[in-house]
Amino acid sequence: MLTYVLRRLLYSILVLVAASFLVFMFVALSGDPLAALRITPNVSQETIQNIIATKHLDEPIPVRYLYWVRDAVTNQFGTTLLDGRPILPDLWRVMKNTLQLVIIAELLAVLIAIGVGVYSALRQYSLFDYSATGFSFLGLATPLFWVALMLQVLMVNVYEWTGRRVFPITNLNSVDPGSGISFWLDRAHHLVLPVFVLMIVQIASYSRYMRASMLEVVNSDYVRTARAKGLSERRVTMKHAFRNALIPLVTLLALNFGTVLGGAVVTETVFSLDGMGLYFVTALGAGDPYPIMTWLMITATMLIFFNLVADILYGYLDPRVRYD
């Protein structure tokens, strides 16, 4: 097992190196980062030349890539293009906010989806099963930005009808959230709607996979053998069926992490949350390639890490899986 993990870590490093070059190349080829500055009044040619010299923008892409790697290793991914602000401190700040949103949404979505999927499989073709299937298809077909906007409209209408703010529709905290437990209660209150939006698609997807996996497992030979031995239905379901049915869901959770981050971009933009999504959209609007490249590299690192975690969990969930 240790040999497998080390081998996968080495492979992941190679993938990260390749991903870093591709990210840098595609972003660098996307356009001139100084195009807007060149047509801005009161910006001298000397200022533009200083930026070009500092960022090595007159060098070939492979040479610029090596300078970027040097900055990533020694200088926290360097600074922004125009104002020279360090990139990584700002990105760490917004990443903590995004992780709060994503982790809460994922945990709740997984718990709800597992319950819905297992119960739907055990009560196949029941009213609950048909209802869960219908809501899952609806959740998969509904755009996240539309759900977020409709929830904001609903909260505004509720405020107009009742004069009470049920849930905030923007920002991560109030103007004066206080400290300690008051701060975190205020943060949780502000995260209710964004978490709900992110949960919708995840519950729809995970519950369908869990239902299909559970149906396959409960009809397998070893489950029928367990029943024939006289084990209780609860023991058969939880010990023999449920554990093996989790394996496809683990794969989906790891591979779906990028989709969750993509949903966070939309959700954070709609709700004006100071997270990675809004940071990415702001960097795109500013035309600054360096925060964009750093954001993409952190996202790629997370994807590779969670895929490694999924591979390791296989050996725990399925005793038949062994790594030499």
Image: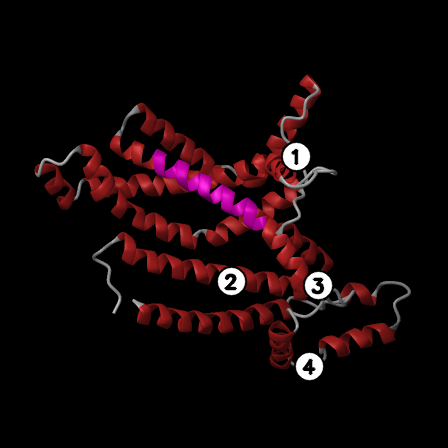
- Residue identified by numbered label 1: 169
Say whether residue 110 is magenta: yes
**In x, y percent, where is residue 274?**
66, 48
The residue located at (49%, 70%) in the rendering is: 16
- Circle 3 is placed at which residue position? 288
Q: Identify the image quadrant of the C terminus.
A: bottom left
- In the rendered structure, which amino acid carries the disc numbered 4? Glu
Magenta range is 98-116
Residue that badge 4 annotates: 59
Quarter location, residue 298 = bottom right
For badge 1, the amino acid type reads Ile
Question: From what the image shows, is residue 230 above or below residue 92?
Answer: above
Q: Tag 2: residue type? A: Ala
Q: Residue at x 66, y 54 (%)?
A: 279
> Mark 1: which secondary structure?
loop
**Disc ID at residue 215:** none
Q: Which residue is mark 2?
A: 300
As drawn, which residue projects farthest toward the front?
Answer: 180
